[in-house]
């Protein structure tokens, strides 16, 4: 995932948390905020220390980036999206994480209309 598509700064994360909407399932929490100034979506990932050691957290982040890469052609532009992983995520594989993320994005209507 290219750097321009990532949310890195704390200020940007806080803007999504404070002014955005939220939705969750058992594995993931999604915060999103419409940003009409940009034509593409940006993603921020957060995996807390309670989930596991650094190897586990990095694996989950890698799976989430991989899932976004696969789903990106269908995601609407103009959104800032922050994904927070919950504890059950540490036992999931890449495909299950992708399915969970797809479920959340579809439920909130963040996919392009056909």
Image (tube, grey):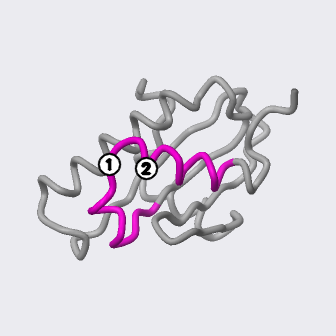
- Residue appearing at x 64%, y 23% in the figure: 73
In the rendered image, residue 34, in percent from the top left (x then y), is placed at 75, 49
- Residue appearing at x 58%, y 61% in the figure: 30
- Residue appearing at x 35%, y 62% in the figure: 89
What is the secondary structure assignment of the residue under circle 2?
A: helix
Circles 1 and 2, Cβ within 8 Å, touching? The answer is: yes
In the rendered image, residue 74, in percent from the top left (x then y), is placed at 69, 29
Q: Which residues are magenta?
A: 84-105
Side of 12 where 86 appears, left or right: left
| Position of 56 relative to 113 (above/below) | below
In the rendered image, residue 100, in percent from the top left (x then y), is placed at 53, 54
Q: Nearer the viewer, residue 62 or 11?
A: 62
What residue is pinned by disc 1? 93
Is residue 94 inside the magenta stretch?
Answer: yes
What residue is pinned by disc 2? 96
Q: Residue furthest bottom?
A: 50
- Residue appearing at x 66%, y 29% in the figure: 40
| Position of 55 relative to 31 (above/below) | above
Query: On the rendered image, what quadrant is the N terminus found in?
Result: top left
Query: On the rendered image, what quadrant is the C terminus found in?
Result: top right
Side of 112 where 29 appears, left or right: left
Side of 81 where 91 appears, left or right: left
Gap in angstroms between the C-alphas marked 1 and 2: 5 Å
């Amino acid at each position: 995932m290219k750097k321009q598509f990532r949310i890195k700064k704390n200020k940007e994360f806080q803007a999504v948390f404070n002014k955005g909407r939220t939705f969750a399932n058992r594995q993931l929490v999604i915060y999103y905020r419409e940003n009409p100034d940009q034509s593409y979506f940006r993603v921020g990932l957060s995996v807390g220390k309670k989930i596991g050691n650094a190897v586990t957290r990095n694996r989950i982040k890698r799976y989430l980036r991989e899932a976004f890469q696969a789903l990106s052609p269908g995601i609407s532009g103009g959104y800032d999206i922050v994904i927070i992983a919950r504890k059950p995520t540490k036992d999931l594989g890449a495909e299950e994480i992708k399915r969970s993320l797809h479920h959340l994005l579809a439920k909130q209507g963040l996919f392009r209309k056909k």
